[in-house]
Every structure is written in C-alpha cells, then in structure tokens.
Image (cartoon, rainbow, N blue to C red):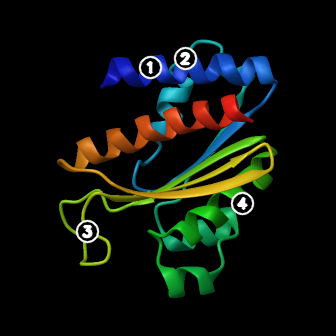
Amino acid sequence: MAIASFELASELGQLLLRKKCSITTAESCTGGGLAYWLTAVSGSSAYVDRGFITYSNKAKQQLLGVRSATLLQFGAVSEETVHEMALGAAKAAGAEVAVAISGVAGPGGGSVSKPVGTVCFGFAVQGKLSTQRLLFSGERQQVRQQAIDHALRQCILLLTEG
C-alpha cells in the first residue's frame, strides 16, 4: 500500500502544481496519514501549507467551525460533518482543495448504522463540494490506509474533471 500511496500523492502533487492549487486536510480517523503522504513528496511545500487533525468533536468545532447541532444530529462520522469539516479547512487554510475524513476504523466503536469500516469523506475542490460514505474491510490500519488512498484517488479525479 505504501508504494501506491506515494505514487498517488506524487500524481496529485503534480496535478496541484499544474492547476496552481493548494491543498489542506481535515482528518479524524486517519490521524494525519493523508497529510503524511502528501508531504512525503519532495517539493510538496509548494502546494501544502497546513493540515488539521481534528480527532475530537471539540477540535472539529474549534478549528474547523463544525456546528454542534450537526454533530448532535448526525454524529462525527457523517456526510454532514465532513461537509462542514472540508469547508472549514478550506477557509482556515485558504486552500483551493480541502479533504475531510471521519470514520470508524475499529476494532471497536462501530454500530448497526455505522459499522467498523464506515468512513465519510468531504471534498471542497475549487468551490465544488461533494461527500461520500464508504465501507472498507479489514483491521484498523487497513481501514485507515484504504481511506487515505481513496481520498488521494478522489482528489485526482475531482481535479481532473474540474
């Protein structure tokens, strides 16, 4: 997986440079893993200024402006929350691209409506917003790595289409 992550991050970096865009991350379940791979690429300081690890609801509210009503009604792992996380990160970082990730990586913490492996993604790409909810399988680290790779692939797709 590590080779794939680096290759995806490299491809995304080249795309960001060509489009003259910067990127920021708002990560919960991936704990900074996405930012790690983005910055593993030499020269990434040209498009990465900062990222946010907002593991707690308090951090999501304080750093990204996620509304307490959103967290109460939908929970931290929801498309509504990652939507607000992505918007807040883009605004706070002044970035053209923002990726938000929140999920249940396991082994505990799952529920009937949000089983282990549930991950929500929010993307703010050049003013266009989108969200996704996916279910990954595997152990904690596998879920986290799949989420990181999906986020990288989706950013490439959204920037290519846009």
Callout 2–callout 1 Cβ contact below 8 Å: yes
Q: Which mark is residue 10?
A: 2
Q: Which residue is mark 1?
A: 6
In what element is the residue under mark 2? helix
The quadrant holding residue 96 is top right
Q: Is residue 141 visible?
A: yes
16 above or below 158?
Answer: above
Q: Residue at the far top: name it.
A: 42
Callout 4–callout 2 Cβ contact below 8 Å: no
Label 2 to label 3: alpha-carbon separation: 32 Å
The residue type indicated by label 3 comes to Pro
In what element is the residue under mark 3? loop
* First in sequence: mark 4 vs mark 3: 4
Q: Which mark is residue 88?
A: 4
- From the viewer's perspective, is 43 left or right of 105? right
Label 4 to label 2: alpha-carbon separation: 25 Å
Q: Residues within 10 Å of mark 4 (few under 14, many from 20)?
A: many
Q: Residue at x 43, y 48 (%)?
A: 31
Q: Residue at x 75, y 36 (%)?
A: 162
- From the viewer's perspective, is 158 left or right of 121? right
The residue type indicated by label 2 comes to Ser
The residue type indicated by label 4 comes to Gly
- Residue 49 percent coordinates (x, y): 71, 34
Of residue 112 and residue 10, the one placed in the foreground of this image is 112
Q: Which residue is mark 3?
A: 115
Label 1 to label 3: alpha-carbon separation: 29 Å
